[in-house]
Image (cartoon, rainbow, N blue to C red):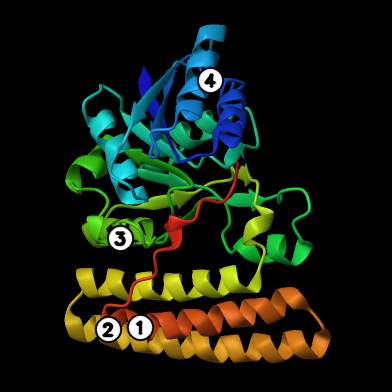
Amino acid sequence: MKKVLISVITCRRPLWLKRLLEALQKQDVDSSISASILVVDNALDADTEKVVTDLSNEGVNIPVTYDEEPIPGIVAARNKCVDVFLNSDNDFLIFIDDDEWPQSADWINKLVNAVDEHKVDIVTSHVISVGEPGTPEWAIDLIYGRNPYQPNDFIDVFYTNNLLLSRNVIQSLIPVFDSRFAMTGASDYHFALRCKHKGFKCIYIDSPVEEEFPKSRATVKWFSRRGFRSGIGYTRSHLFEEKLYNAISRCIAMAGVRFLRGIFYLLLGALSFNKTKFVDGIFRVCSAYGTIAGFFGVKHEEYKTIHGK
């Protein structure tokens, strides 16, 4: 029997959390897999706890446990999930975000079965953004862009919005998520970089989740900040994990590539009146600046504002 803990970090999004938990209850889990769900509340919110309690009282196919992480920030909440996992007898830890839901009823099965099929410790798939009602199409098209991967590709970069980790990889990288990224984002990119350096392999499979992209994020300002923040996170991650010369060379080269591509998309978007490409250009230029700003200890705390419901 393979035991799986599905962890959900949430912060003042009770309606979206309820949707996710109800979707997870519809999973058609193989008899060879034992699944449970952990909800870690990073806001100590009574409405959030009530969602879990009410669902459990109604009767569930997959048991749900509520826990709290009083230290603010996504890193502390993720590490709380890791601590609970390590104190259990589960074999695998799956991360899914509270604004998402599995696209198919065999999502859990596909992630777990890929471990033995491909002899890996890490399995991931993509996120499909559907957009909150009223969200403009240009923002939905831009948030994840074109999926560059094919099923069974081995990849180096992955994130915790649709991810399975084995106990082996978690025990090898404690603390799993670095507190230096507490409110800035990029802790999962940094974790992926550490996994790569440790020699762990990640397989990409076709088992997507869907995400409701909030209308409040569909602004040029938000994408600009996201680009700037991602650039900073990229540089800090490589500075923490690589020799200084290698990190500096890599990040300067990346900043140059991002800037040139950004200018190209800006011009292309302006000439074709394509807002998706135009804002993508802004995103890339801001990411280039963020990549350089990361050398000087600049931080952007993206997670102070809660989007969603």
- Crowding at label 4, few (<14), some or many (≥20) Cα neighbours within 10 Å? some
Identify the residue under disc 3. 181
In 3D space, how far apart are the residues under numbered discs 4 and 1 (Cα atoms)? 46 Å
Badge 2 amino acid: Phe
Which residue carries the number 4 mark? 29
Q: In which quarter of the image is residue 239?
A: bottom left
Confirm whether residue 68 shows in the render. Answer: yes
Residue occupying the point 37% across, 63% down: 184
N-terminal of the two: label 3 or label 4?
4
Task: Give the structural element (helix, strand or loop) at label 1.
Answer: helix
Check whether the beta carbons of the residues at disc 2 and disc 4 lie within 8 A of each other: no
- Give residue 32's position: percent from left, percent from top: 44, 17
Q: Do the residues labelled 3 and 4 touch (CB within 8 Å)?
A: no
Q: Can residue 146 be seen in this view?
A: no
| Image marks 1 and 2: residues in contact by CB distance under 8 Å | yes
Is 302 rendered above or below residue 17? below
- N-terminal of the pair, mark 3 or mark 2, is 3
Q: For the residue marked with disc 1, what is the amino acid?
A: Ala
Instruction: Tell me the SS state at disc 4.
Output: loop
Q: Residue furthest front?
A: 46
